[in-house]
Amino acid sequence: MTIETKTAPTLEVHSLDPLSDQVSVGAWQRLGEAALDTNPFYGPAFLRAFLQHVPGYAGRLIVVKNPATDDWLMAAPIRHHRPGFLLPVSSSLATDYAPLGTPLLHPEANEDVISAFFQEAAGWRKLLALPFLPLSSETARRIQSVAGLHYEVTAKTERACHLGGADGAAQLDSAFKGKRRKELRRLLRRLGDVGRVRFEHLSGGDAIEGFEAFLQLEAAGWKGRVGTALVNQDTTAAFARKAIAGLAASNNVRLDQLWSGDRLVASIVMIEQRGNSFSWKIAYDEAFSRYSPGVQIAMQAFRQNLDTPGFRFADSLAIPGHSMIEPLWKGRLETGTLLIADGTLGRTLQRLCSADIAAKEDLRRRARLIKKRLSA
């Protein structure tokens, strides 16, 4: 579809099959590298691997492009989804494997671009949900500045993160001091009595090999027993291997490992892009639980992030209130579901969808409270 605008001769809006060979992967990658806010989960390496192998998430890639240059100006995967209990809406894709719904938005994208994207993505309902959107991001600010659309934020949460530079160093010092510092150092010394302790940091082709070791480590633990390890299902195993291989090819993944002698004790998978790191998966050997391997590797990832040239920010991707990561990564990233509506129908559905999401969130809070009381 071609749209005449006031600020540019034309814009082209496309609804694409993300897996099609006709999609310009080069233009897609260039947008991801230039976007106001990074979202590696919306890049071709991760998204295509996910959609190819994991069933139940079919959708379209909505793209706004400049036809004169073929440059992509805005893009995100959109599907029909029930963010609450009842009401299906058009929504950007966010899953347990990638809880980040930030559209890829070029710095030169103006109101016409965002409006064109919304009209195509929202469809006849004139309502679009952007779940897990970082609310202080430049992308969120720019989207909400478009005149004529109506916005509501619901399902606000906070999760652990940490900064770079001096602020990040202060956060690390705040987390790793006093009794915690002494105890973790003592546990590392005790681990050294079992075998020589070392940390490894793998990237490129080494990260692919290291990821196979990670998969085995995860499967041997509690996730393997309950059936949620990546290799428990052929689909998730194939998706994860392909995604990591694709990210490693562009040097966008790092594996941090803790070893005791010749035994891998803990590992964390960090997805990286333009100075931002995302803590994707973590696993540890339960036979070494007494040495707090999960805490040790999370703190090491923190240190490694700070030592990486150009590092700016790390997102834990963890659930709010995560008992291990929140005391260690002291920053907090506020996210929410941004509901964007247009016209009478869109605003009516916006109010209904907001109430629907609130009811679901309230039920989740009650369930967590009951679970906490039962385990006390």
Image (cartoon, rainbow, N blue to C red):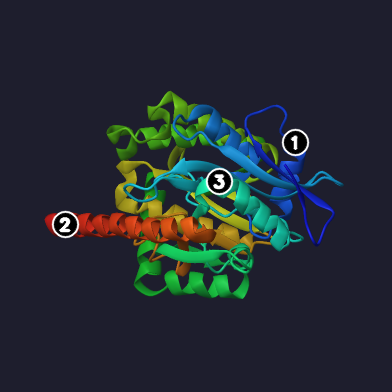
Crowding around mark 3 (Cα neighbors within 10 Å: few <14, some 14 to 19, many 20+) is: few
Q: What's the distance in space between the residues labelled 2 and 3, CA to CA?
A: 39 Å
In the image shown, does 369 or 196 lie closer to the viewer?
A: 369
* Residue placed under numbered mark 1 in the picture: 24
| Residues under numbered marks 2 and 3 in contact, where contact means CB atoms less than 8 Å apart | no
Residue 20: x and y, percent?
66, 28
Crowding around mark 1 (Cα neighbors within 10 Å: few <14, some 14 to 19, many 20+) is: some
Q: Nearer the viewer, mark 1 or mark 3?
A: 3
Residue 99: x and y, percent?
47, 50
Q: Residue farthest to the front?
A: 344
The amino acid type of the residue labelled 3 equals Gly
| Sequence-first tag of 1 and 2 | 1
The amino acid type of the residue labelled 1 equals Ser
Residue 209 seen: no
* Residue placed under numbered mark 3 in the picture: 123
Residue 16: x and y, percent?
65, 35
Residue 217: x and y, percent?
41, 36
Q: What's the distance in space between the residues labelled 1 and 2, CA to CA?
A: 49 Å
Q: Quadrant of residue 249?
A: top right
* Residue placed under numbered mark 2 in the picture: 370
The amino acid type of the residue labelled 2 equals Ile
